[in-house]
Amino acid sequence: MTSRTKKAHQQPKTDDVEWVERSGYWLEKCALKVGKQVRSLEPKPMVLNGHGVSLRINQGCLLIRNGFTHYPQQREEHRLFPGDPNLPERIVLLEGSGALTFDVLDWLSRQGIPLVRIDWRGNVVCAIGGNGYAANPYRVQWQLETRADNDKRMAWSNALIARKIEGCIKTLEKVIPKSPAWELAMRRAYADLTRLELDPPRDIQTLRTIEANSAARYFRAWRSIRLKWQGTGNRPIPESWRTVGARTSPFGIAGNRNAGHPVQALLNYAYTVLQSQVHIQAVREGYDPTRGIMHEASPGATPFVFDAMEPYRAEVDREIIGLLKREPLHAGDFIVREDGICRLNPQLARAVAMHAQTGHRAVSSDIDARRGSFDGLT
């Protein structure tokens, strides 16, 4: 190797090169996961992203071309045949760009495949049910009556948060390392469960206070988790990125959508995948997503979806922590905008979306079961 070659070899990689390498890495991970899914009897979602995504009907089949996120990249192409037992349970479009036709929507409707669009902040832009929205009047009536009757509303909401806290305890036990913060989180969680059982709140505000304080202790226990990084010699990262950090975002007083930390950006995507599945299932079973029981309504919101997804957040947390333990992160996995907001490499976002699918499979049957346990409507 000549001195010139050695010098070139030692040059730090540019952002573009690292972006391509990390995109290719996560793309390969997604391909391996898809390969495993094909052998499963359980239908799985299909996750698409990048620029130039195309969905069109070709000779009666749905022809899907995934988008591009880096160069060079071989374009993925899928042909879905009507009635095929291996059809995906839904199609998730992560940001990017592209096009589809009305014929595609008709085809998806006939096959019962919902379509979900998620933006880069981790918001569900739209969730189109494969069979459309046809509310079951008895279930909507149950929603309205439960919301109007404070005793029923509180019974359902208290049970909901109790299950959420139980899930947090399981996550603490399974994947969070023990520390003084861990001990405080466990103590708080068990105390809150005892309170919910022996002296349940009689108003939503008191319940939300219990939930918020329990969640604060829970996420504080995460801060002891040190993240594995590679390539930081050539591309330094903020010192705060070496641990999980706080769940709250410094870029907005309402919610955590504008993440300032990689782990929070990962969680935003993962929770949105959960939200989309619960939304689709609620509509499929005839509930009205806009009729919340615990959560309050607001323009454009789906409060019943946020109600129903609460017990499953901790399951998604376990998936994300498991991913962080298995996979070293790289600065090329993220973009920090000029305003400090952290965005994911689109192929990493796709990997997160696919990993998060395994954390809440029971959602498809649990919404109706929990409702039935309180009212018995069909």
Image (cartoon, rainbow, N blue to C red):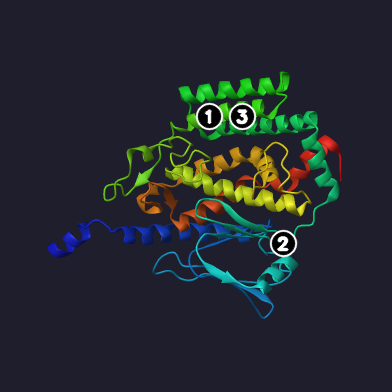
The residue under the point 74% across, 29% down is 154
Q: Amino acid at mark 3?
A: Glu
The residue furthest left is 3
The residue under the point 42% across, 61% down is 24
How packed mark 1 is, by other alpha carbons closer than 10 Å (few <14, some 14-19, many 20 or more), is some
Considering the numbered disc 2 on the image, is that residue within a helix, a strand or a loop? loop
| Residue under pointer 1 | 216
Q: CA distance from mark 1 to mark 3?
A: 9 Å
The disc, 2 or 3, on the residue closer to the chain's N-terminal end is 2
| Residue under pointer 3 | 211
Q: Is 277 rendered above or below residue 93?
A: above
Does residue 106 show up? yes
Q: Amino acid at mark 1?
A: Ala
Of 40 and 303, which appears nearest the observer?
303
The disc, 2 or 1, on the residue closer to the chain's N-terminal end is 2
Position of the N terminus, as image quadrant, is bottom left
| Residue under pointer 2 | 130
**Which of the numbered marks, if any, corresponds to residue 97?**
none
Considering the numbered disc 1 on the image, is that residue within a helix, a strand or a loop? helix
Residue 28, how many percent across, how many down? 47, 60
Q: Is residue 264 left or right of residue 240?
A: right
